[in-house]
Amino acid sequence: MSEPRTIPSRPRDRLFAAVTLVLAVLLLPAAFVRRPGRARELACRWALRLRFPAENLTGLTDGALAAFTAARTEALWRHRQLIGLTSGYREPLIQQRMFDEEVRRSGSPAAARMLVLPPTESNHVKGIALDVRPHEAARWLEEHGARYDLYRIYDNEWWHFEYRPECGGTPPRQRPHPGAGYAWCRPDHGSGARQDQRLAPQPSTTITNRENALVDDGVWDRRSLLRGAAALAGAAATAPLLGGAAPALAGGGDADALFKAGKFEQAGRAYEEILKKDPKNLLAARRRGYVGLLSNRFPDAEKYLKMALKLAPDDKETNQLLGDCYIRQDKFALSAPHWKAAGEENYAKWFAAVRGEAYQVHGETARVPLQQMDPMPLVEASVNGGPTKRFTFYTGAPNLSVRASVAKEAGLRPVASQKADFGGGTVLAYWGILDSFQLGGIELRNIPVSWSATVSGEDVGTDSDGLIGMWVFYHLLPTFDYAGRQLILRRRTPETARKARAAATRAGAEPLPLWLAREQYLHSTGSFAGAAGSRTGVVGVNFGGVGEIAAGVRGRTAEQLGIRTDYDRQIGTSAQSHPAVVYPCYPKEIHLGNAVAKEVYCYTNPNQPVNVPWPYGTGFDSMGWFSHCFWKPYNITVDFTGMNLYIARGKAT
């Protein structure tokens, strides 16, 4: 294997890789609930998104996306190898700019072509080329990628792989460099290409059948995973939302534009006007309900989501939103049939098992010290009255999860289970109901919980005893006191919310809007600034987890704002002369209320979409997100009653 000079694997990188793997294991039960036929893929995607937050898979062909998704899923679960993407699809204009820059740097088009091809010849523009990281990931793909029709193409680019199904499992002739001509398949590649044609997804197949194709008696099959992932990648374009004659879906340009821009109050009023004229407009009713749910305005959300459900009882998105609306209110029995109608059988079974009042809060206040800040925060908690355990937390994850040994010690009994391959063996994911979870002076009783174990009942990961997700936090009034290295948790009532608001005001914190999307994703309003100006809009806010950046910048925001970007450094490699789409960047300023950071380390990806629609995203624009490292000088109070965010500098008083 011909290799250019690379940055050696750093201890920090190995640590982040280990933590990412543990997070994937902790997220596996929740992924099984959300997508039983694609749980390993979903848990892998969630964990890798945290490790590689700036990567972008948009624009890859269905086949390339399916192959890469299947390969990185196997790499993580079977061989514990992380595969990140630094560059996939590139727009022709971006590819041309990269080529022109290399011509200027190297002095001639011929010299430039040894590193970068013009857009008419680049397979990045065709959506079948992938530049991967780290170096160990490329080694894994060289060894195993042929099973997914992914091949290394150039001697001088260890990171560059292409999706070439026509080669039928036999690597094409490797070229010295990009300018040395096309890497043709070898003539003896046999009948593999014809076999791949039989595996191609059929547009007429329903989404449910595609998902079911991924599983056979709980055991994953590589070709089934590849076939199903390819089908799902094209599902939005090939499958109608509703069968038969559907109600009107047009929501009105102005209302939709307001919603996508994060102008939710104005969008809600605009959708109401549409419904006055067209009461059978499904999109307007569903979006108006979604607007209410974003701000935890449950009567509004239920009113309009039920209106949408009458128009289309089988609409999965409406059922999912209404199911989320009910679990936020602890109405699990009401939520279960809607999750079932949304195709989430495991969620329905899990929530139907909840008896009595869920998330009962005992105690008034808890101050829980952070036992560790980096690479992920750890706190101590007790499960079912047992000895204290060390838990990490991440608001981008949904439910509480624990290690298998913790579940056994606590006497947990599963209400559902699922098998999955992991590290050459099998992992069992379980879901159940926990009697008691205590964080300092606050105890939660009767709460949904998940855990994973090997077939012999051993722990899958040991970096922490569990993960505290968003569902725990939104039942409380939490302050993430990074500066004071503690969590402050309070019983969530109008009175405690009033006192917290008053304390935040005295500390100089202004109320920021807070929106909760898709069960666990927090958003507020923030801004990014560069040499060319600043922009304010909806941003994601993530507390806990693991990462080394203060924020991430999506789309062309960095370029448009003139944010200083290190275009000479491909993240994760030292292939300095090789252009990449993912870059380190250093905004002049990033703002979230009165919280400001200047010239801090961030990521940017010019091709990363600012808006990812349902079922994979929120459906509205978000130009970036604020992450673990940004919060360290501050304490942040999250008021789920008034739906506001308060950020104050220094320790909480």
Image: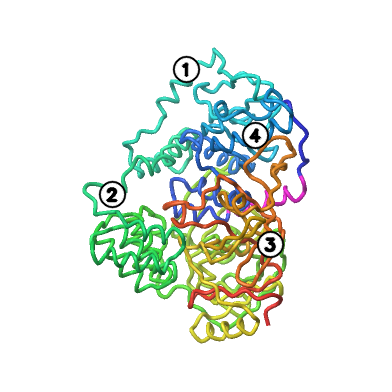
For marks 1 and 2 on the same chain, the one whose residue lies earlier in the sequence: 1
> Is 23 within the magenta?
yes
Where residue 140 is drawn, which disc sits there? 4
For marks 1 and 4 on the same chain, the one whose residue lies earlier in the sequence: 4
Amino acid type assigned to the residue bearing label 3 in the image = Cys
Query: What range is drawn magenta here?
Result: 10-25
Measured in 3D between alpha carbons, the distance from the residue under mark 1 to the one under mark 3, in whole angstroms, is 52 Å
Toward the front, the furthest residue is 532
Q: Secondary structure at mark 1?
A: loop
Where residue 242 is drawn, which disc sits there? 2
- In the rendering, at what x and y percent does residue 403 appear? 60, 59
Q: Quadrant of residue 401?
A: bottom right
For marks 2 and 4 on the same chain, the one whose residue lies earlier in the sequence: 4
For marks 2 and 3 on the same chain, the one whose residue lies earlier in the sequence: 2
Quick one: 361 or 171, which is closer to the camera?
171
Q: Residue at x 69, y 21 (%)?
A: 176
Q: Residue at x 55, y 18 (%)?
A: 185
Tell me whether circle 2 and circle 4 mark residues in contact (CB < 8 Å).
no
